[in-house]
Image (cartoon, rainbow, N blue to C red):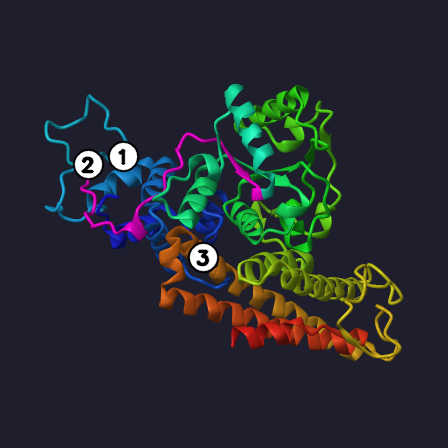
Amino acid sequence: MPNYDTGAIRNLLTEVFSDADEIEFFCDDYFKVVKFEADMALKKRAHALTQYCAQNNLLDKLLALVQKKNPAKYQELSASLLLEGDPSAPATRQPQTAEVPAASAPAQPEAVAPSPAPVATPASPADLPSTPPKTNDIFISYSRRDLAFITQLHQELTKRGISAWFDKENIQVADQWAASIVEGIRDCKVFVLALSPDSTASKNVRKEVDLAQRYDKQIVPLMWRNTEIPVAMEYQLAGIQWIDFKETASTENFNEMADVLRRLVGGASLTEATTDKLIAKESTIPKEELVTAAPRQLGGLKKKPTLSPMAIGGSVISGVVTTFGLDTADQDFVNLELKWLFSAADNFLKIRRGEINRSQPIAVPIPADAQHQPQANNQLLSTVDDFYTQMWEGQLDSGFKRIDTHLKNLNILLDQEARKGDAGKGDVYLQNQIKGARIDIVKILQEMAQLMNQAYGILVISPNQLLELLG
């Protein structure tokens, strides 16, 4: 990577973006993992974005996008973006810069940055890059117990001109497994999830689905062997059409699958890509229950979406529980309790807003291990008056905002951990930061559990248990 001056890049961002909202919208488009606190100033946001890109080898991408956004300002400041020549290695590539018109180009160009020199750092075996080819359009996530089918799927897609990657085919002996998986997901265009009872019960597959969602990849669920979708995957698969092979590895199924993938790689949505396909099925997980409201145009400005309890709950399940290292049985126990907790919060707020009446029960059954009062029946307790519901509404809203802030920080840290592979697992400072972010979130979950206990007479116990494990 070129030896960039991150301070100069930070200054460039403050020149290109007019205010804090504009840089946030930019990140929403190109760097979705990067999130900002609500009141963060433009300079601090520029610093956070620069640091994220520097830590994840994305400065080239950032500068290319900034150049495209404001070519004149980029050309004006491009000469300052690189540090003085690095004598440790020769220059090997040119940065992406705005072209200078031939008629006005001086004999000795000054506006175009000099050829950068990559930073020379000795590589240890743990730091060696993974080798999934950069041309792969498709990443296949699967359980080892489905290896025979996945091998055939890979061969059939390859015969039809689809560039696909799965770990048995592509990871070399010297590669670090985690780093190769992360690069394979990060560099793909479409993430194919081969569903079976074994894959939905796999910790590694759940982590891969979480990575695909955090990297904003198009996820294609391919039902190979019929299975129930665990709560751990509901957030990522909500509202997404399925491809259903019905355990039949036929030429017709492979032809239709290849056609769908070609359309997706070409830029079509999954709905567009599957519109005429018999193997396509509608999702059984309603999207409207899990996602935030879309931003609206108001007076020419984007209005930030409101925080949906179900969306926050899905993010907590994905970012806190899936990545925590629990076995899948413990994950499922925690996830079911958290699904009830956030469903209860959603039910409570809808009652407060007058969207449903007080007798409307929570849609999710009471968890088996939850503590509850004898009269509790998933409905708001009749003894609770409006004074308390108004007070609890404010506490819930505050809790969602705090969780959202901690989740943004946690996602950045988890992204750093994933990119570092085994080295990230051994980075004590990074692991302490991740642990601290999880603890902050779980403490708020404890507060929410107590509020919902007062409102419904039901107390979920998993937040307390999680905090004990984290402590």
- Amino acid on which the number 2 mark rests in the picture: Ala
* Image quadrant in which you'd find residue 7: bottom left
Q: Residues within 10 Å of mark 3 (few under 14, many from 20)?
A: some
Q: Quadrant of the N terminus?
A: top left
Magenta range: 115-144
| Label 2 with label 3: CB-CB less than 8 Å | no
Pick the residue in front: 455 or 467. 467
Residue 291 seen from this side: no
Residue corresponding to mark 1: 97
Residue beneath label 2, please? 111
Q: Quadrant of residue 95?
A: top left
Tell me, yes or no, whether the two marked residues, 3 and 1, touch with CB atoms within 8 Å.
no
User: Residues under labels 2 and 3: Cα distance?
Assistant: 34 Å
Point out residue 385 in the picture as x, y percentages from the top left corner.
83, 78
Q: Secondary structure at mark 3?
A: helix
Seen at 62% across and 53% down, the residue is 305
- The x and y percentages for residue 235 are 65, 51
Going by the numbered disc 1, the residue's amino acid type is Thr
Query: Residue 285: x percent and y percent?
Result: 73, 46
* 65 magenta-colored: no
From the viewer's perspective, tell me whether residue 399 is left or right of residue 421.
right
Which residue is tagged 3? 412
Q: Quadrant of residue 151?
A: top right
- The mark nearer the N terminus, 2 or 1, is 1
Labels 2, 3: front one? 3
